[in-house]
Amino acid sequence: MPVNEKLWRKRREEAYKRLWEDLEIGYLDEDLLDILLEFFKRPESYTTSSCSGRIVVVDSHMPWERRDATIIFKKHAPISLDEIKDLLKQPVLYRLWLVASGPIIHVVTLTAKEALKVLRIAREAGFKHSGVMSASRKGYLVELRTGIRLAVLLKTPNGLVVNEQGLNEAVKAVNEALIEGKKRLNRLLEALHRHSIK
C-alpha cells in the first residue's frame, strides 16, 4: 500500500507545530530538541512521541507491565539517594521497582528507502534495538531504541528488599544507565550531522 504523500505532509506539519507547542508548555523533553529538529531537516522524515531516557519508580507486579501499574516518580535526569528514600516510606500495592530506560525516538518516513537510512544512522550511533514498526498509508514508523533498560526491585507489601548499601548501588547503577543513554543521544546527533541532506 503506497504512502499517501499529501496526508503524510499534513501530518508532518502538524507534528512540527506540536513540537514547538510542547516545548512552550514544558511538555517536550528538552534533551531531544536538537535531534528532533535534525529529523525535521530531512525532507522525508519527521518525529512523533519521543523520550531522551528516564528513571521511574513504579508500583506494579513486574517492571514492564502497564496494566494496574502506577508511576510514582519520573525524572529525565540523574536521581539522588534521598529522592528514592522518601518514596520508600509510602505503602506499596504490588511491588516497587526502580527502572532506568534509554532513549526512544519515533520517526515517520515517507519512503522505505528513507526508513532504512534512518535505521542505519541510528544503529551507527548505538541504537541497536531499532526497527520499522509499521508501514501504512500514513508512512513508515521507525522506532529507535538503544536497548538500555535496568530494573531493581526495592519493596513489596511485606517490606524493603534492599538495604542501605544495596539502595545506594541501585541508584548509582540507574544513573549510569541513564547517562549512557544520553551519550548515545549525542552520538545520534553527530551521526545525523554526518548524514545530513545537503
Image (cartoon, rainbow, N blue to C red):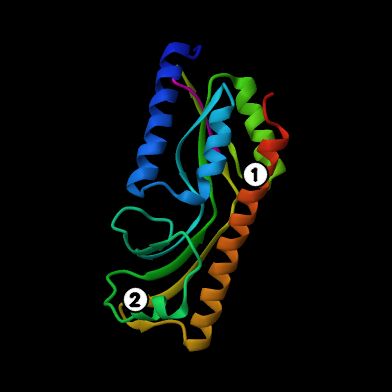
Asked whether 61 falls inside the magenta stretch, the response is no
Residue underneath mark 1:
188
Location of the C terminus by quadrant is top right
- Residue 3 visible to the viewer: yes
Q: Is residue 97 above or below residue 126?
A: below
Residue underneath mark 2:
87
Q: Quadrant of residue 192?
A: top right
Neighbour tally class for label 2: few under 14, some 14-19, many 20 plus, Cα within 10 Å: some
Q: Secondary structure at mark 2?
A: helix
- Picture residue at 55% right of the left edge, 61% below the top: 178
- Picture residue at 52% right of the left edge, 81% below the top: 168
- State the image coordinates of residue 188 (x, y, percent, origin top left): 65, 44
Q: Is residue 98 above or below residue 132?
A: below
Q: Is residue 198 above or below residue 129?
A: above
179 or 4, nearer to the observer:
179
Q: Quadrant of residue 125?
A: top right
Neighbour tally class for label 1: few under 14, some 14-19, many 20 plus, Cα within 10 Å: many
Amino acid type of the residue that numbered disc 1 sits on in the rendered structure: Leu
Indicate left or right for 32 with 86 as reference. Answer: right
Work out whether mark 1 precedes mark 2 in sequence or the reverse, and give the earlier one: 2
